[in-house]
Structure formats: C-alpha cells, structure tokens
Image (spheres, rainbow, N blue to C red):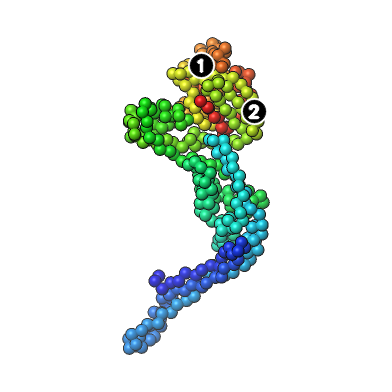
Amino acid sequence: PQLAVQPVDAGIALENGQVVATPAVPGRALDVAATVAWLQENAVAVVRQGRLPLVVAPVAPAVADSSALVAEANTLLTRPLVASTFDPVRNEEHEAAIPAETWARWLALEVDPASARGYRLDVDGGAAVAYLNSQVEAMGGDRYVDKEAAAAAVEEAIFGETLSLRLRLFHHERVHTVGPGETFSSIGYDYGIPYPWIQQANPDAGDALRVGQTITIPSPDVLLPLPIVENKRVIISLSQQRMWAYENGAVKWDWGVSTGIASSPTAPGVFQLQSHEENAYAGNWDLWMPKFMGIYRPVPTSDFMNGFHGFPTRNGYTLLWTSSIGRPVTYGCILVSDENIALLYDWADAGVVVEVQR
C-alpha cells in the first residue's frame, strides 16, 4: 500500500465561468507476483548489489476522458437556478436566483457503470446544502433546510426542465433562560409550544423551575409532522374568538368560533390538521364531537388530540353549546357551528397548517 498511487479520473472544473475538462492521471500498483518471480531468478545479483527492483503495473483511471460531459454541463449553465423557500411556522416565503457560476461548482463527474459512457454528471449534495443553509442563516433566525431533501431537490432541479426548486425551512431547538415568575405553562404559552412538550424535552429540569435555569424549547416543527399543504392555512384568534380560512392567500371563510376555557385552554402555536373523524368521543368529558379534526396533542405521549368539531352531544342526545359561539366554552378544542364545520371538514386536507394566535 505504501507504494501504490491511486489514479485520478478525468473530471470537470470551472474556469472563467465555463466548465472545462480536467485530464486523467494513471496510477500504479506493486505487482507482487512479478517482483517475487524476478527475485527468484536473480537472487544472487540481488544479494551482491543489495538492491531489489520492484515491478509495478500501471492502473488506468475509471474515466479517461471527460470532454463529452463539458458541452452537457455548459448547456445547463445558460440559466440561473431559482430557489424558493417557505416557512410554515412563520408563514414566510423567499425566492432567490442562484447564479450559474455559483451552482456550477456543485457539478461533479460520477462513475456509473450502468451508463453508456461509464460515467455521468452528478451534483455534490453536500456543497449545495452548505450554500443553501448559509443563505438561510443570512435571512435571520435559527433555521435550516433538510440535508437529504435539499440535495435531492437540487439534483432534480438541475437535471430537470425548470431549473427551480422549492424547499421547506425548519427550525432548530432553542435555549430559554428561566426568568422570575416563569413556569413551564407560561413559557409554553409564550413560545407557542404546549408545555408538556417542553417538559418532555427537559426530563432533568424538575417540576419547579428556578430563575437562571436553562431549558430546551423544542422546535415548532415537532408539531407539524405531515407534509405541508401550502395553498391553505387556517388562523384562529383566541382574543377575538374568530377563525379565518385562507386559500391561495385569499380569505375563504371568516367565522366566529369558541375555544377552551381558562382551566382547559386552547394552546397558542402553529399546528396541523392530522386526523378526520366523523364522530369522535372524548371520554374525559363524555362528549361526542361531530366532524372532528385533530390538530395537536396537548401531551406528546398521549393519543388524545385537541382540534375542530361541531356542536357536541352528551348521553347520545343532549346538544351542547349551541349559543356559545364567540366565547370560550370548550375543553381545549375549537368549536365551529355544525353548518361551518361540515364545510371545513371537506376542505381542510390532512397537512393544512392551523395557526392559533393569542
């Protein structure tokens, strides 16, 4: 191994904004069998001279000539790569054109025995993701793009027809320093994270927080487990007891609603439609809830969810809260009239973001 020299494949490089071919360089390897055979035939001379010539064999590179890919690569570089990002938590979108001289550096030659040439153009996903995350950091906030999703999206965009990609932004965990009078509940309310999720992220924090203690705030993305439905969004106002449903950026419905009472409040935060049940049962309160749509688990280890529903019944016949729309009355869910919940149930696909504002 000390004597081996690895061959260098022909490749591609960027010079003055254009892709050029780089030459191949042969390698070498010690031919042990040939060296031993020579030694056996010339042992006396080796002993007298104290020298043993080694027999080495050239090692050909896997790719001897990359010039066929140069024209293909330069054709790709005639347009910028358009990258757009969306943040479902902050409801933000950004779009930027990545110059060809920038993303050209992500192009690489990949040995591929299955291809006709034995090699093909590829994308250095690590370089692409590093650049994209640097641009995301420059936008402000502790956000990032998913490595695997971003690398796949870049490759698809470059070798597809549109030269455009769209990526979701994710949020890192945060660190919070406990201030005077703060509790898990108040911190969760301020961050828009149901407080049992914060307790779960801090198993060693204890039940009573102390001033100056640092705790981990989970990423809000833990509450958005499904693929995002981008063209729809529902906003709930706890202070106004209203909801707005948006489609393609325009208000589709503006309704009064009722949210949770003080002892069992609806948590503020950014959540997501995760389930649809024609008639769900809440055993704690003996309620049947029509057209139920779950949006978050108050306790991460429980299957119980808070969500939307129409006027509930108890004991199979008593209709509750029919005159309560517009004031807090539920045990954490969002009450919508029977007429409106039927519309919302059919329109709100799994994955629609629901933002509950304070």
Give the structural element (helix, strand or loop) at label 1. loop
Q: Which residue is mark 2?
A: 251
Image quadrant where residue 88 sits: top right
Front: mark 1 or 2: 2
Mark 2 or mark 1, which is nearer the start of the sequence?
Answer: 2
Question: Outermost residue, top direction?
Answer: 318
**Between 43 and 146, the one nearer to me in the picture:** 146
Residue at (43%, 76%) from the top-left corner? 31
Q: Is residue 168 above or below residue 314?
A: below
The amino acid pointed to by label 1 is: Val
Image quadrant where residue 352 sits: top right
Q: Is residue 290 at all visible to an observer of this figure?
A: no
Q: Is residue 164 above or below residue 210?
A: below
**Between 134 and 234, the one nearer to me in the picture:** 134
Q: Is residue 285 above or below residue 167?
A: above
Q: Position of residue 226 (x, y in %)?
A: 54, 36
The amino acid pointed to by label 2 is: Val
Residue at (58%, 24%) from the top-left corner? 243
Q: Position of residue 183 (x, y in %)?
A: 38, 27
User: How far separated are the C-alphas under marks 1 and 2?
Assistant: 26 Å
